[in-house]
Image (cartoon, grey):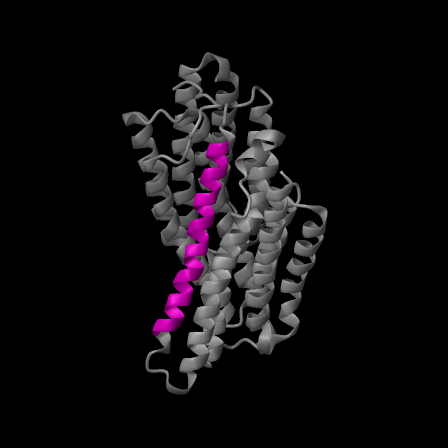
Amino acid sequence: MTSRDSGQPHRAASPLELLFDLVFVIAVSQSAGTLHELLSAGHVGQGVLAYLMVFFAVWWAWMNFTWFASAFDTDDWAYRVMTIVQMGGVLVLAAGVHDAMASYDFTLVTWGYVIMRLAMVGQWLRAAASDPHRRRTALAFAIGIAVVQVLWVARIYLLDVQWQFITFFVLMAAEMVVPVIAERQGRTAWHPHHIADRYGCFTLILLGESVLSSATGIFAARGQGAHVLALVGFAAAGLVIAAGMWWVYFSRTHGELLAATGRGFGFGYAHYVVFAAAGAVSAGIAVSVDAAADATALAAPAVAAASAVPVGVFVLAVWGMLLRPAISRRASVLVAVLGAAVLAAALVPFVAVAAIVLLLAVVVVVLEVDGQRRQRAG
């Protein structure tokens, strides 16, 4: 298990990586579904905070595997077995998502997460034994991850609920510090175009949840009588919103940007905001469907915010991290203003979804026109 060539042409996601992503669909679906349940019941603060906490575990485990695979993927039997063990951990984590979000019982989520992370320790130890040039880096990763996992397990058995809550954020920070320290021992040979491709794959998974919510709305419209038109309208709007977000994210290629800047930490860590927002959109759509069927305790402004906030955050995060360096200054200002306007759509609750659809369409037009102008100029 030695470092791969970071300049290898045509590097893309492997079949094993795509299978790995499919298991994460379950964890993402559980997270978004429980967020929808809590929001619709009126538990907004609990739902949002618990979602962000659980989503960290999902995102961090996926991201660490992705960057390791980009640098050391051998695709031999040992690598495949360790990856499948991680997939088992994802399933355990997914089984505990509802309890974690509904009652802050993180026992099952923690064990699923630790299974995934200890499998990564094994991968890093194997890399340390195989690649002398990256040995210090690999050992730093292995030791750092192992220590933090011991603390995660100790936390749920030695501390009361209040201190478990507080130490969650301490250990979250510790997890994020480990790669920073380890990479100082020697940078791993991750592949910028492969990383961009993998992040695109995970974005598609998250947007797929929104499409699923849209389809669910259409299914719910059957037999709803007076609510049928509103339900179909919200479901159709959900599909358009998911498509608009897809268009915005993939309007520019990101591999060249990552290769040019070399800022792996900025790209990797900032995507938490993009991913969490994308995952929450499906819950917002589902809440709007509930409102159309008079099946939610939320007031109209909160229903509007459930859709407007994640879409607006997504647009602004993608703009700030990926689009701003790749588009003209005029287009950049317009996209930023339109992203803020999507957030502000929460202030017009009865037309919020229509406003989001319209504003996203304008963002897409701005990006397409800017792209065509650049092509003509080039």
Q: How many marks?
A: 0
**Secondary structure character of the magenta stretch overall:** helix
Q: Is residue 129 above or below residue 241?
A: above
Q: Is residue 200 visible?
A: yes
Indicate whether residue 322 is drawn in magenta.
Answer: no
Relative to 94, say whether 124 is above or below: above
Question: Which residue lies at the image location 40% right of the left edge and 71% below the top edge?
Answer: 217
| Viewer-nearest residue: 116 or 1 | 1
Residue at position x 60%, y 64% in the image: 359
| Rendering coords of residue 108 (x, y %) | 39, 49
Whether residue 262 is visible: no
Quarter of the view holding residue 172:
top right
Residue 127, horizontal then vertical, whole percent: 42, 20
Left or right: residue 31 versus residue 186 is left
Q: Residue at x 38, y 67 (%)?
A: 215
Is 202 magenta? The answer is: yes
Residue extending furthest toward the bottom: 226
| Residue shown at the point (49%, 51%) measured from the top left | 54
The stretch in magenta equals 193-219
Name the quadrant of the C terminus.
top right
Q: Nearer the viewer, residue 287 or 228?
A: 228
Residue that sits furthest to the front in the current view:
376
In the displayed structure, would residue 8 be above or below residue 158? above
Image coordinates for residue 287, horizontal then vertical, percent: 48, 70
Residue ranking furthest to the left: 77
Side of 366 where 229 appears, left or right? left
Instruction: Residue 84: name its quadrant.
Output: top left
Lateral position of residue 108 relative to residue 330, left or right = left
